[in-house]
Image (cartoon, helix red, strand yellow):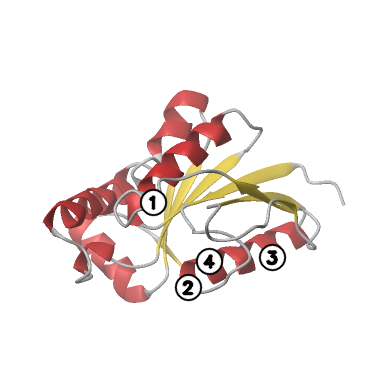
């Protein structure tokens, strides 16, 4: 099958899904897109999985890229590296997952004119594990996810209602 459209998935820990809802969500979405003739590159952190290159699913490829594997820098450092990497590739759409990675959703649009999508899986700043600085950055990520991408996707009606009320943003709920 030829793949005329190429999508980059950025923000998940990796592939295949070992644990976590975002990783499973990305894997399921990638397979469904590939079966529709859309090529998908899933960016993966090296400490999450050894996968690198084509997967058993035709049209799905894993791209392992480095990160700074600390609690506060892992996700954002990986997102920066992957976003910059995607700018040099032929991706037609760049799809960010989660609030922190969504901070970079403007770069592909501004630098390459590429459409972006951010999927919001939850309001991460509400989680107790984050300190004050991290919560502030994640709140910025929420604002960015409402303003920067061409489309904001949410995984629940409650998140959709929150984005409508707090940001005046229409979302797609899946």
What percent of the width, then of the height, locates residue 42? Answer: 61, 52
Any mark on residue 21, and which?
2
Query: Mark 3–mark 2 contact, CB under 8 Å?
Result: no
- Report the residue marked by disc 1: 74
Farthest-out residue, left? 132
* Within-10-Å neighbours for mark 4: few <14, some 14–19, many 20+: many
Foreground mark, 3 or 2, reads 2
Farthest-out residue, right? 1
Q: Earlier in the sequence, mark 1 or mark 2?
A: 2
Q: Earlier in the sequence, mark 3 or mark 2?
A: 2
- Residue 117 shows in the view: yes
- Residue 174 shows in the view: no
* Above or below for 93 versus 118: above
* Above or below for 80 versus 168: above
Q: Earlier in the sequence, mark 1 or mark 3?
A: 3
Which residue is painted at 42% across and 32% down in the image? 107
Any mark on residue 32, and which?
3
> Rounded to the nearest whole Å, what is the CA distance between mark 3 and mark 2?
16 Å
> Rounded to the nearest whole Å, what is the CA distance between mark 4 and mark 3?
14 Å
Q: Secondary structure at mark 2?
A: helix
> Rounded to the nearest whole Å, what is the CA distance between mark 4 and mark 1?
15 Å
Query: Mark 2–mark 4 contact, CB under 8 Å?
Result: yes
> Rounded to the nearest whole Å, what is the CA distance between mark 2 and mark 4?
6 Å
């Amino acid at each position: 099958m030829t793949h005329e459209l190429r999508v980059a998935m950025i923000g998940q820990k990796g592939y295949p899904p070992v644990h976590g809802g975002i990783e499973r969500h990305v894997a399921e979405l990638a397979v469904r897109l590939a079966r529709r003739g859309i090529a998908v590159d899933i960016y993966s952190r090296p400490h999450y999985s050894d996968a690198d290159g084509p997967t058993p699913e035709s049209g799905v490829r894993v791209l392992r890229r480095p990160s700074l594997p600390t609690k506060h820098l892992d996700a954002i450092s990986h997102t920066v590296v992957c976003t910059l990497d995607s700018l040099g590739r032929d991706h037609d759409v760049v799809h960010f997952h989660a609030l922190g990675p969504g901070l970079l959703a403007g770069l592909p649009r501004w630098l390459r004119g590429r459409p972006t999508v951010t999927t919001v899986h939850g309001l991460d700043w509400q989680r107790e594990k984050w300190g004050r600085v991290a919560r502030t950055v994640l709140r910025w990520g929420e604002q960015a996810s409402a303003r920067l991408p061409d489309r904001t996707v949410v995984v629940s009606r409650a998140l959709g209602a929150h984005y409508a009320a707090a940001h005046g943003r229409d979302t797609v709920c899946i």
